[in-house]
Amino acid sequence: MSGERLAVPLPQAAAGHAAGWWRLKPLPRPRFSALNLAFGFTAISIVVLATFAAPLWFAWHEALDQGRGEFLREEAVWLSDTFHKRGPEVLAAIIDRRVISEPATGKIVLFTDAARRRLAGNLYDWPAEFTDAPGPQLLTGELNGRPTRMVMVRVPLADGYQLLVGRVTGRFQRLENYFIWGLAGCTGIVLLLGLFSGLLIRRAFMAEVHNISQTASAIVEGNLTRRLPLRDAGGKGGGDELDMLAHTVNRMLDQIEQLIHGVRDVANAIAHDLRTPLTELRSRLEGLSLSRPPAEVTFAEVESAVADVDRVIGIFNALLRLAEIDTGARRSGFVEVDIAKVLGDTAEFYQPVAELKGVALSCDMPATLVVSGDPLLLTQAVGNLIDNAIKFARERGAIALAAEVRDGGVVVLTVADDGPGIADAEKPKVSERFYRGDTSRGTPGVGLGLSLVAAVAKLHRGGLELHDNHPGLRASLVLFSIPA
């Protein structure tokens, strides 16, 4: 046992923690608000301002240091030449005269002998911080009884004479202070403007959010007519981005209201249209249950009951097709469709039905007319138009099928009959689901044929147009050529 290890299982939580201790937790997403947005832009503005000021400050100091170095070199060369040409006494006199005559230039000169005793200049003692290293040196010395920050360079002369040439570094300090205070002032202005802008933006957004909230609350409570207020009420393009959003939301609310009313109307129409076949079916079955008729009569009643059930199933199938079309899912399967072939095949299919009624069915179309669409839905739409035309065409009448291409690649399929037609007041309503006009009360159907045609046309970015044929009706299915 002494050579074996004892394995102690960790708890599941502890094991998971031990296995994933190295995983970093995701950073919390920043909270979006108008103030955060304004402060973000303010921070960006400050960074841009600093990005502009930092190179400028660096370039200023570089240029200042370069200018001081050039001045010190020129001054040292000139004084050194004067010493070699005219001697130490003349150099001392020149130095004292220049220092006295130009006190505001910030020049510093110290001329000493070999023992570093002052012979001339406005610096009275050799700086203790100054070393014998070559090149300019930055140090603090006493000038006119006050400690002064300066940059100096040493020039050794013949016979041990020493020359210190320098310049006061704080000569442009006031200008630098102005720059710093100006930068700080600009930063403060940017902060104040950012805060003020954030408050204004927040106030504007909160007002719009309040309007949207009130509108949504009113719609939730049942007031479907409530809309967002618009600054550009006339829609002439004078509004801002919030007006564009309000226009979009109002269009969405219009569509929602229309859909809700449509669902309500459809529900009422379904209840009305299904009540009749279901009531008949119940009465028929109840009669069979009570009377117990012979087998022949029973089977006849059962066949009638099956017809009622088929009618109900047909209504639901039509509603399912309309729902599928309304979703736009069929648009993904668009292919090139030969409309001439669709019209020809559909007319050939309905030709026997037209002959039974004595109606002449004619076609006038191009040899080839290709659009992008759903062939099955287009065939159903054309079939519904022909079926309606046959129902309402007069005895020994005529139905004309035609196809044409208008400007812009618009394809129009027309089915014209010579029946009673549709009154102008009813034309906008006949494409509504379950709507049946006065002329169609005695004909079979549930009022979904033209609704399906209008839905197919809408799926193909088109529409259903109804016009008088004098006499009769001209129903035109307008299609736009859409790439598959």
Image (spheres, grey):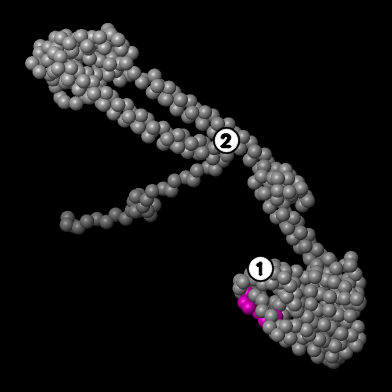
In this rendering, the answer to whether 436 lies above or below 295 is: above
* Residue 62, percent from left and from top: 31, 30
Instruction: Give the residue drawn at x 74%, y 55%.
Output: 254
In this rendering, the answer to whether 414 lies above or below 347 is: above
**Residue denoted by label 1:** 328
Where on the picture, by quarter, is residue 413?
bottom right
Secondary structure of residue under mark 2:
helix
Say whether residue 337 is magenta. Answer: yes
* Residue 95, percent from left and from top: 22, 12
Instruction: Farthest residue to the front: give it.
Output: 85
* Residue 88, percent from left and from top: 14, 12
Per the picture, the main secondary structure of the magenta-coloured stretch is strand
Q: Amino acid at mark 2?
A: Gly
* Residue 286 visible in rendering: no
Where on the picture, by quarter, is residue 76?
top left
Residues under numbered marks 2 and 1 in contact, where contact means CB atoms less than 8 Å apart: no
The magenta region covers 334-339
**Front-lying residue, 335 or 102:** 102
Say whether residue 434 is magenta. Answer: no
**Residue denoted by label 2:** 198
